[in-house]
Image (cartoon, coloured by chain):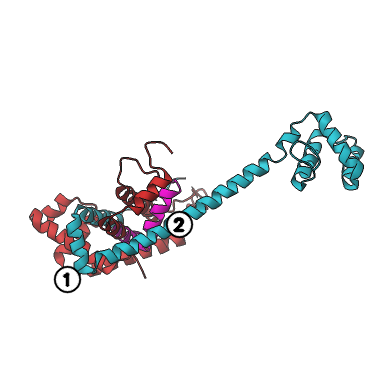
Chain colours: A cyan, B red
Amino acid sequence: MTRKPTEGPDLFLLANALVDDLMALSDDDLLREVREDEGDPERLATEMREQLQARVVRENKARLVNARSALNIARAARAGANVISLPLTQKQQILSKFAAADGRLRERLTMAARKGEGATEREIDDILKDLVDLGAIDDEGNPH
Amino acid sequence: MTAASLSTDEVRDAIAALTTAELIRLQKVGAIYAVGVGVEGLDVVNEAVSRALDGTRTCPRDAPVLIFLINAMRSMASSERTKAKEEPVMESMSSTLDDGPAILEPLAEGRNVEDLRLAREDAEARLKALEEIFVDDDDAQLVVMGDLDGLDADEIQTLGGWSAQAYATIRRRVRRKITARYPRGWVQ
């Protein structure tokens, strides 16, 4: 879908002309103008410097928040990555040990079995990730 | 981030090292573009700084950070101007009857007609306010009109029949009066 620009007086073009004129001034002429029109140039510059510093601090904080968020996501993605890469038989052994002592886990595995499928590898991986998240096993599948 | 561009830390350091005159230029340019857009000057400056620091825009290593920030503000103002000048294009033209009147269906997405109407009214109010500054200054009025219509300096100078020096004086008067009237941009 296209849109067409309308014609007419253009404030942007006026602004450009004003900016060009401002930038053509020497520093000395600029500071002289400020003294004539607004007072102390240092006061104006200090005010601007403080505003910029505040903005830089704010942007820095936002960057750190984003970085921390990205790190947390990466950590979550990595959690359990080692244990689910173990051979299926080894993963089944880890679960069997836990199922013997954990009624809820045993029930979860039994329900999967009742569906006639047994526990699929994906189901096993999900359970192992849960156990890692809960701190029940480490990333290698060893009980804590 | 390539080696041809400043890193975020380098941009931060360059901003911290701006001189008194550069800081004043930055403030004034922000205020000028802000009047064109209809916002406060500091908002324009802050947005340019944010885009530099968050990597939205990268500062070439060989460009002074002041020029880079001014170009960023110019680009933002240009983008706002393009949006303000857009008008809704009809989604389709159809007719319920073979020889009946065409039915124009407005766009379903983007700015609606009401938004655009308000944006235009706001721009017209700013334009009128600027023109009123020079109600008793015919020379300045001519320069402002020429700028608004996109004439270049030579064309405006010829139109007014001024010498280069006389034109420069009028041009400077126009800028100083506008920045004196709106030192912090379009603050209502």
Q: Residue at x 30, y 56 (%)?
A: B26
Residue B96 located within the stretch drawn in magenta: no
Q: Is residue B75 visible?
A: no
* Identity, as a three-letter code, of the amino acid under mark 2: Val
Quadrant of the frame with the C terminus of chain A? top right
Helix, strand or loop at mark 2: helix
Q: Residue at x 44, y 39 (%)?
A: B1
Q: Reply above or below: B180 against A100.
A: below
Tag shown at residue B136: 1
Closer to us: B31 or A54: A54
Q: Which chain is mark 2 on? A: A
Closer to us: B14 or B159: B14
| Majority secondary structure of magenta residues | helix
Q: Reply above or below: B10 against B119.
A: above
Give the residue number, with chain letter if any, for mark 2: A57
Q: Quadrant of residue A52?
A: bottom left
Magenta region: which residues?
A: B29-57
Residue B52, percent from left and from top: 40, 48
Left or right of residue B182: residue A67: right
Q: Which chain is mark 1 on? A: B
